[in-house]
Amino acid sequence: MSRVVLDTNVLVSAVRAERGALAIIREGWLTGRFQVYVSEPLLAEVERTLAKPYFATRLGPDRTQRFLTLLQRATVLQPITERVVGVATHAEDDWILATAHNAHAQFLVTGDKALQSLGTFQATRILDPASFADLLETAQEGCPLDRER
């Protein structure tokens, strides 16, 4: 099964997505098309983001708590044993690259244009949500996502 790291912007936006790329990614994750890996820094950023007024008012406390519980149950917590320093344009983004690297992820899905511009990091392809959703839709059922048609 493919290992995927979904950046905070993808995770928190996918909570509310009813259609489009983010909904496709969420459904792919929840139906077992790929395994999502997270790290402590990623989970902490998700919690901080969901506590901001924009998400807090739109999701409410119950939906927010259900999503955080889902993250704990339906993801693999990846310890960061090898740090990444000075790769991302913004130093605070190096931890998401470290999460992908330590998880041996095939994909990092992010809305961050600076991270997307890297294209790859180590063995991880960095894709925007629309490209990853397209990959999910075109991959044959049961076919590994990292094998292109």
Image (cartoon, rainbow, N blue to C red):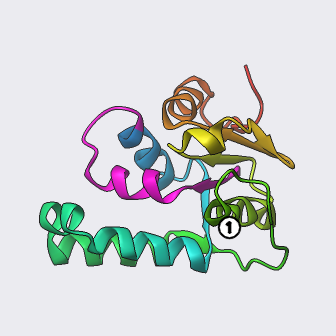
Q: Residues within 10 Å of mark 1 (few under 14, many from 20)?
A: many
**At 62% from the left edge and 58% from the top edge, which residue is drawn?**
35
**At 28% from the left edge and 45% from the top edge, which residue is drawn?**
17
Q: Nearer the viewer, residue 21 or 81?
A: 81
Secondary structure under tag 1 reads helix
Q: Is residue 19 magenta?
A: yes
Q: Position of residue 147 (x, y in %)?
A: 77, 31
Q: Position of residue 89 (x, y in %)?
A: 68, 50
Q: Quadrant of residue 47?
A: bottom left
**At 57% from the left edge and 35% from the top edge, which residue is drawn?**
132
131 sits to left or right of 73: right
**At 75% from the left edge and 65% from the top edge, which residue is drawn?**
98
Q: Quadrant of residue 24?
A: top left
Q: Residue furthest top?
A: 149
Quadrant where the C terminus is found in the figure? top right
The vertical placement of 72 against 102, above or below, is below
The amino acid type of the residue labelled 1 equals Trp
- Range of magenta residues: 1-21
Q: Position of residue 102 (x, y in %)?
A: 79, 67
The vertical placement of 126 against 59, above or below, is above
Kindly identify which residue carries mark 1: 95
120 sits to left or right of 33: right
